[in-house]
Image (spheres, helix red, strand yellow):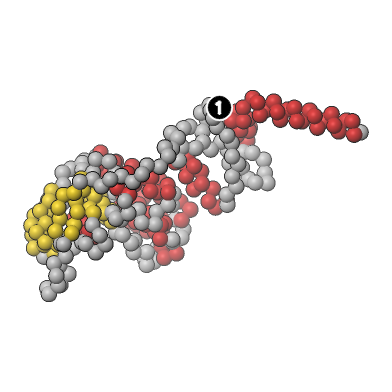
Amino acid sequence: MRFDGVWFRYGRRADWTLQAIDATVEPGRTVVVLGRNGAGKSTLLQLAAGVLRPSRGAVLDRPPVIGWVPERFPADQPFTAGDYLHRMAEVRGQDPRAADEWIERLLLTEHTGTRLADLSKGTAQKVGLAQALTARPGLLILDEPWEGLDAVARTLIPEIVAEVTGAGGIVLVSDHRGEIATLPEATHWTIADATLSPAPPPSAPPSAPARPPARSHDEAPSHDEVVIEVAVPRATADRAVAELRATGHRVLRVRDEAGAPAGPQARDKAGAAAGPQARDEAGAEAGQQTRDEGLAG
């Protein structure tokens, strides 16, 4: 895709927002567009998407299937989240069920019956991301995609970008939050004073402590592990499990606070995680209690 001498302004007497833009993006590449707020990043992305038309010049060889995620999802629409995504799949010529993959991956299942206008900003942003991906895009445009997203969705952005570019697609993404360190091998453009220029990759922020690698829930326990019991509201249980697994932790079982563990398999796993020493201590404690009760009798 090529920006061929592109100029743009929002009115005949307005100053130029962008001028003399000449740039090319090859298939399978990611471009991160940098610049201060108001520099013209969103304008460039909308020109790439075809939402705006250049005042002069042209955008050439744009892929036919485009996924566009604006910075703010237009949630003032008379649909529930599920109905909107299924209808958008139909608009794109897909089976409505094509949206279900992204509903599940972005943890939107519990929100499918919620009206778009009632969604939080972060959840609405995930709906916008899902609609852009329902039909596999040859050009994916993400305008500040991390804005308002939860931790699980943030970890999915680099994965989604890699899937699109791995299939030969192009990804254009704007960012002013310093999240770009999570997008390896990206090309960087800077917009300043209405012009575009190549930029070196910004320095990565100080690295956080390394996360443990994600492992299967039935993997043998490590001697370095401890078991921590955490209670969460029932409505957020699925999200909590997904977040824990996304950060490399094993979830041994899920049970009702006042009820029994979820079956013999969960009890066996909990016993295995506790280890022989814990079981021996539990047995010794039970035996001591029995002896004490006998003496009391």
The residue closer to the viewer here, 36 or 118, is 36
The percent position of residue 40, horizontal first and vertical second, equals 21, 61
Which corner quadrant of the image does residue 166 belong to? top left
Q: How many marks?
A: 1
Could you tell me which quadrant the C terminus lies in? Answer: top right
Q: Report the side of 71 relative to 297 (left or right).
A: left
User: Is disc 1 placed on a helix, strand or loop?
Assistant: loop
Task: Residue at 14%, 70% (x, y): give it.
Answer: 15
The residue closer to the viewer here, 253 or 147, is 147
Task: List the single residue furthest toward the bottom.
Answer: 13
The percent position of residue 100, horizontal first and vertical second, equals 39, 48
Which corner quadrant of the image does residue 195 belong to? bottom left
Whether residue 59 is visible, yes or no, is: no
Q: Report the side of 189 relative to 152 (left or right).
A: left
The percent position of residue 267, horizontal first and vertical second, equals 63, 33
Q: Amino acid at mark 1?
A: His
Q: Which residue is disc 1 drawn over?
A: 223
The residue closer to the viewer here, 24 or 131, is 24
Whether residue 110 is visible, yes or no, is: yes
The percent position of residue 118, horizontal first and vertical second, equals 45, 64
Q: Report the side of 144 relative to 18 (left or right).
A: right
Q: Report the side of 24 relative to 169 (left or right).
A: left
Query: Alpha-carbon neighbours of circle 1 within 10 Å: few (<14), some, or many (≥20)?
Result: few
Task: List the single residue furthest toward the right.
Answer: 297
Task: Residue at 42%, 37% (x, y): give it.
Answer: 210
Task: Residue at 65%, 26% (x, y): give it.
Answer: 277
Task: Residue at 23%, 57% (x, y): give it.
Answer: 35
Above or below: residue 117 compared with residue 147:
below
